[in-house]
Amino acid sequence: MKKLLFSALFLSTIALGFSSCMNGDYDANPLTTNTTINPIKPVGGSGNGGGNGGGGGGSVGIATKGQIRCVVSGGSNFVSSPASNYQVTGNDILITGGVLETTLQRDVDLYISGYTGVGTYTCSGTSSTSTHGSYSVETLGSGSTETFNTATSTPQGSGTITVVTDANNELIGTFSFTAYSDKDGSKSVTITNGSFDVPKF
């Protein structure tokens, strides 16, 4: 009888342990892709083009440590290598990440001018030292690079970069922007559902 009671108690404890990994709508299972906000690192999610991402593209998930993630116009996912980081120069911050593909090198750069801490920064100004977002595509072997920048292109783009956590040499936040080509002002990209979780370089 003691063995039966002990076995039932043991199995109940194991079942309770497995069910505790379910946190409502957010599933803590690392083998699944979550589209809801992580209750431990509450960044990302869906929005309408503001600091929490935006519509108009697929879901790319939320950046994990050392990553930048976003959706590029047309639903193309950008997931940077885990070597993404940020650098500080005076009161300015550059967040940078890239992904090497078979024939392309794609990069996302987020530049915050006059950084003062956690908050939302609007992409504005017309110089490379203004707060801006940029997306570049290099065709490997051809020497051809096209950059889409919110600040230095004509017409000027727009967007926001939101820092939600700045602690222990780690920046976590979200971004979205629309930028125009440095080669052809009639071409643009819209970046949505952007998130970053980057260490200091």
Image: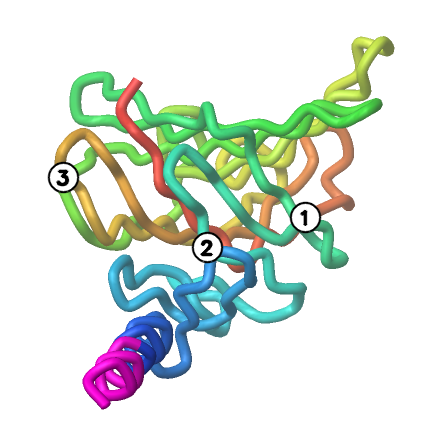
Residue beneath label 2, please? 62
- Residue kind at label 3, given as amino acid type: Ala
Q: Which residue is mark 3?
A: 167
- Looking at the rendered image, the disc whose residue lies closer to the viewer, 1 or 3, is 3
User: Which residue shows up at 24% across the image and 83% down it?
Assistant: 9
Q: Is residue 76 magenta?
A: no
Question: Where in the figure is residue 90, as x and y percent of width and height?
Answer: 17, 18
Q: Which residues are magenta?
A: 1-10
Q: Nearer the viewer, residue 77 or 23?
A: 23
Q: CA distance from mark 2 to mark 1?
A: 20 Å
The residue lying toward the viewer, choosing from 191 and 129, is 191
Q: 154 left or right of 127? A: right
Query: At 73% from the left edge and 51% from the top edge, which residue is drawn?
Result: 76
What kind of element bears circle 3?
strand
Where is 144 relative to 160, above or below? Answer: above
Is the magenta region chiefly helix, strand or loop?
helix
Quadrant in the picture for residue 14? bottom left
Q: Name the image quarter holding the N terminus.
A: bottom left
Question: Which is more N-terminal, label 3 or label 1?
Answer: 3
Task: Name the amino acid type tagged 1.
Answer: Val
Q: Secondary structure beneath disc 2?
A: loop
Q: Nearer the viewer, mark 2 or mark 1?
A: 2
The label number, if any, that marks residue 189 in the structure image = 1
